[in-house]
Image (cartoon, rainbow, N blue to C red):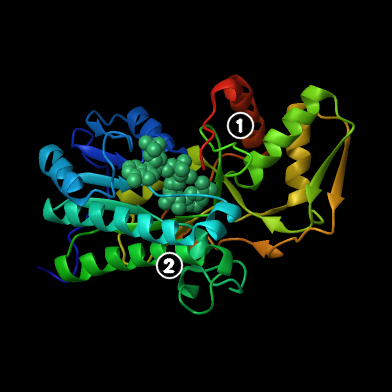
Amino acid sequence: MSEQPDFRPGPLDRSATTYVAGHRGLVGSAIWRTLEAEGFTDLVGRGSDELDLKDRSAVLAFFEETRPRHVVLAAAKVGGILANSTYPADFLSENLQIQVNVMDAALAQGVERLLFLGSSCIYPKLAEQPITEDSLLTGHLEPTNDAYAIAKIAGILQVQSVRRQHGLPWISAMPTNLYGPGDNFSPTGSHVLPALIRRYDEAARSGAESVTNWGTGAPRREFLHVDDMAAACLHLLEHYDGPEQVNVGTGRDATIAEIAGYVAEAVGFEGLTEWDTSKPDGTPQKLLDVSKLAAAGWTSQIGLREGIASTVAWYREHVGHLREAG
Ligand SMILES: NC(=O)c1ccc[n+]([C@@H]2O[C@H](COP(=O)([O-])OP(=O)(O)OC[C@H]3O[C@@H](n4cnc5c(N)ncnc54)[C@H](OP(=O)(O)O)[C@@H]3O)[C@@H](O)[C@H]2O)c1
């Protein structure tokens, strides 16, 4: 096969079978909505109860039966700091199995375009800010989620290796922190933003006088709405071709205190926010450099304040029947 993958930028064939792995998750469901809205007519998805992606022979059989031409790999075992640091063996093993099975099956069927999704935790703990793609593998990882990060780094290497050995134009994207409809709001498994939404919403409903958050509120974090993420994924599938993973973010960060303020405003909480400074802050800043994405022609559209307000509205509509796992 040729060294250079045969890729021409432009619209994907909307009638081609397109498999979204993890289509019920935060990211996968947003990608599904976006592809549907963009006119894709043959989307395929399977829940983990129908197809366990750890089951190699079932995955190979599924690909042989459905023969997708495009694949978005948004299935993964995902969790917050607590879950990651308590179950590192599960995070490493399950994510490696899912990725290897899906990519091997996709290779066996000659899938033309595959997008592998990782996470910004692949970058070294002390990477220079904003974090550029080429800081990958230049330093030690954050120990609390190193097992997860190593699995994701292996996924990037698998994409690069398939490109090198087989010439298929597969790509990888590394999103920053995401939020939006379909997020995991469970008290044990959730990330910072859904945890804040749940906490402030409960406080607003119960008429609490104050809310206490961990740390000082000073750390800076970047958040991207999942609908923006999904739009970026489609854009990359249609316009980007290269071995290097592409960071996907807004390029702007905010302090946790500012973010908490947007959440309080969105839920209508008028009490006090207090900061438990005996609790750790974590890393002072985490911001992706998104110039590669911008050079590929995409920038985010949904502002943080507006995105938080619409996510709060979604949360309130669904609060009785949210996912509690994780
Ligand atoms: N959330 C974030 O802030 C964030 C940030 C950066 C990157 N990402 C990346 O985006 C990807 C998706 O994350 P997410 O936030 O959408 O996670 P999520 O909401 O937990 O969704 C994960 C999906 O993976 C599926 N899945 C997990 N194990 C499976 C298995 N053994 N067999 C079949 N399906 C399985 C689940 O299927 P069922 O629902 O059917 O069980 C679920 O739909 C991950 O690679 C993650 O690293 C997420």
Marks 2,1: beta carbons within 8 A: no
Badge 2: residue crowd in 10 Å (few <14, some 14–19, many ≥20): some
**Residue 90's image quarter?**
bottom left
Residue 312 appearing in the image: yes
Foreground mark, 2 or 1, reads: 2
Q: Nearer the viewer, residue 195 or 130?
A: 195
According to the picture, the residue beneath numbered tag 1 turns out to be 311
Question: Which secondary structure lies at badge 1?
Answer: helix
The x, y position of residue 185, in whole percent, is 59, 36
The single residue placed furthest to the bottom in the displayed view is 138
The x, y position of residue 1, in whole percent, is 9, 68
Mark 1: which amino acid? Thr
C-alpha span from label 2 to label 1: 31 Å
Q: Residue at x 19, y 60 (%)?
A: 168
Q: Is residue 313 above or below residue 218?
A: above
Whereabouts is ligand 1, in terms of quadrant? top left
The x, y position of residue 100, in whole percent, is 26, 58
Badge 1: residue crowd in 10 Å (few <14, some 14–19, many ≥20): many
Disc marking residue 150: 2
Question: Which secondary structure lies at badge 2?
Answer: helix
In the figure, is residue 88 to the left or right of 209?
Answer: left
Q: Earlier in the sequence, mark 2 or mark 1?
A: 2
Q: Is residue 112 above or below residue 50?
A: below
Q: Residue at x 79, y 26 (%)?
A: 204
In the figure, is residue 24 to the left or right of 302?
Answer: left
Mark 2: which amino acid? Ile
The x, y position of residue 163, in whole percent, is 22, 66
Q: Residue at x 17, y 52 (%)?
A: 105
